[in-house]
Amino acid sequence: MDPTFPILARLVSPEQIHELDDKELRSLADEVRAAILANVSRTGGHLSSNLGTVELTVALYASFKLPVDTVVWDTGHQAYPHKLLTGRLDRFDTLRKEGGLSGFLRRDESPYDAFGAGHAGTAISAGLGLSAAKERLGQPGKVVSVTGDSAIASGMCWEALNHGGASNANLTVVLNDNRMSIAPGVGALHGHLARLRAKPWLQDAAARAKELVDKMPDPVGRVAAGLRHGITHYLAPEETGAVFEEMGWEYIGPVDGHDLPTLLSVFRSVRDLNGPVFVHAMTVKGKGYPQAEADSRKWHGVVPFDPSVGELAKAAGPVTYMQAFGEAAIELASADPKVVAITAAMPDGTGLTKFAAELPDQYMDVGIAEEHGVTLAAGMAAGGLKPFVAIYSTFLQRAFDNIVHDVALQRLPVRFFLDRAGLVGDDGPTHHGVLDLAYLLPIPGMTVLAPRDVTELREMARWMAAYDDGPTAMRYPRGAGDDRLPESRSPIARGRAEILVRPDRPSIVILALGSMVSPAWEASRLLKEKGIEATVVNARFAKPLDEETILDVVRQAGRVLVAEEAAPHGGFGDAVACLLRENGLAGLPFAHAALPDAFIEHGSQASLRKTAKLDAEGLAGRVSELFARSAMAR
């Protein structure tokens, strides 16, 4: 048993929490907070949001009865306490490490992870489904969905709230209102919550209620304690829960999300209620670690750090793709007032934080509402603006229908910038951007680009800003590009590739897209040492293909390796294979280097690329295998 965490270390399952008295529960909460700080400072991960849900989680699990009851968490940004209270302390030091615990919810990681989540806004819908399953199958227990004040502004949450209230579902929703999402909260709902929190009389009423209850003798005090959480609700239902009550939910709150006795009385009472119940808990992001409380955005997602010093290491090294896009966007928007930037609650992650500060009138954060953001951009483009939509590759999946019907069908010149395309690393399968080529290439009129490095990203962004004959999308990876590539460059032109290496007598051509250009170039150097001369092509465009260049180099070399950091089906490789078939070259030795047809777990980008054979050595090995197969075929 870990002497640092005497109570937490002996918890094998959340059922054991019910054996603890309220004083021990307070100690348990302290241990959970300490365990999060100790481990996340070593592994990196989401810190401030998880520090803010400690008491909330302890009270939930001391009041509800897992596994008979079910708790669904929205993403993993607030679920580290859940992991610790469900028997994972002994593995918590493997968080987000290859082969270790996921940073998000995974059904195959624990039976207590009732529903996997990595994209925000799913908890209420999933909770309704689990509740319906319990009712249909005659199973006992309640369902609780925990969501956040940024996630609840998403469309899915409101669709689920509308359905749940109308159907009188037996579900409890807990809103973790921590005043701060990854980006500053946006929208009318966030403003309503902020105004509510700012009501001095509301806070005074809560304080007076607590003082009154504390002075009551037992057993009257115990009865009153179970009611005090609702005093402010009954004083001002129109100010607090009117929106939710009109939708059919019993609103309770706001309650202090760090007052453990209050939370215990609330949740113990709520468990006995039937029908849709909405509990509004106010928490402090970063609670218990002063640095994170003072700047919760900075401490939201962290790299390993020294908690005694309380400083995060500043990023050093070459310019990243994200930074290059942010700089290019500012340059283009400063020169052209028609350029506007749109993101979905990720200004930091997409490189738009500085843009928002310098050009606020040309910037919009729509919150966790990718679908709305895309159709908003379509309307802007229809009105004559030049929208730059910056969304992670994996998050843009949510807006596929909007891209097809609202943008492409109308040939509107919306510019999409897909950060985190390919393998992202420690965040794992919910965040790897591996499907964008498969869902973008089939869309008629869509132009899809991928830069070889940050210099080419800037040039492509300038070309996209000037191109207005339909939608464009640029995908680029997390991290920095390779500045060792040859500097001879040709101008960006739609559907034109760039030949980086072309020996006089090549025996293979490597057609590489985006992040694979650098390892392809390095692989050609390794192959040359073995006497194999390789032409290396930077495709630049996945759609339209540079058919003339590709057919020319393939006919000269006689063998082809296509490399892309994406799913193996429906992407660049399939497009090239189709081109070769249509031009009578289907019989040539052909190999396709792509990611496996599987959901890829978390790990470092370098390690995952090596495993997938998408590093230089892996590509060179595939070439050797291709030569061996073609020799056997003769």
Image (cartoon, rainbow, N blue to C red):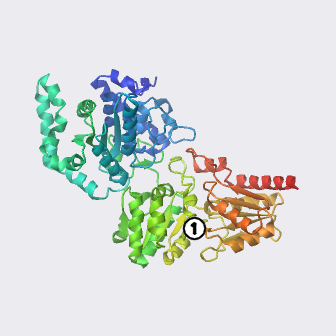
As drawn, the residue found furthest toward the right would be 634
Q: Is residue 265 visible?
A: yes
Percent across and percent down for residue 435 are 56, 55
Above or below for 437 versus 545: above
Above or below for 549 versus 115: below
Q: Is residue 327 visible?
A: no
Residue at 33% x, 71% y: name it: 361
Q: Between 211 and 85, which is closer to the camera in this rendering?
A: 85
Badge 1: residue crowd in 10 Å (few <14, some 14–19, many ≥20): many
Residue at 38% x, 55% y: name it: 368
Q: Quadrant of the C terminus?
A: bottom right
Above or below for 343 versus 73: below
Instruction: Provide the residue designation for mark 1.
Output: 449
Q: Between 302 and 507, which is closer to the camera in this rendering?
A: 507
Percent across and percent down for residue 489 are 64, 74
Q: Between 280 and 21, which is closer to the camera in this rendering?
A: 280
Query: As drawn, is 273 to the left or to the right of 555?
Result: left
Percent across and percent down for residue 83 are 43, 35
The quadrant where residue 530 appears: bottom right
Percent across and percent down for residue 183 are 36, 56
Amino acid type indicated by mark 1: Leu
As drawn, the residue found furthest toward the front would be 136
Total marks in image: 1
The quadrant where residue 84 appears: top left
The quadrant where residue 479 appears: bottom right
Residue at 70% x, 56% y: name it: 592
Above or below for 218 versus 315: above
Q: Secondary structure at mark 1?
A: strand
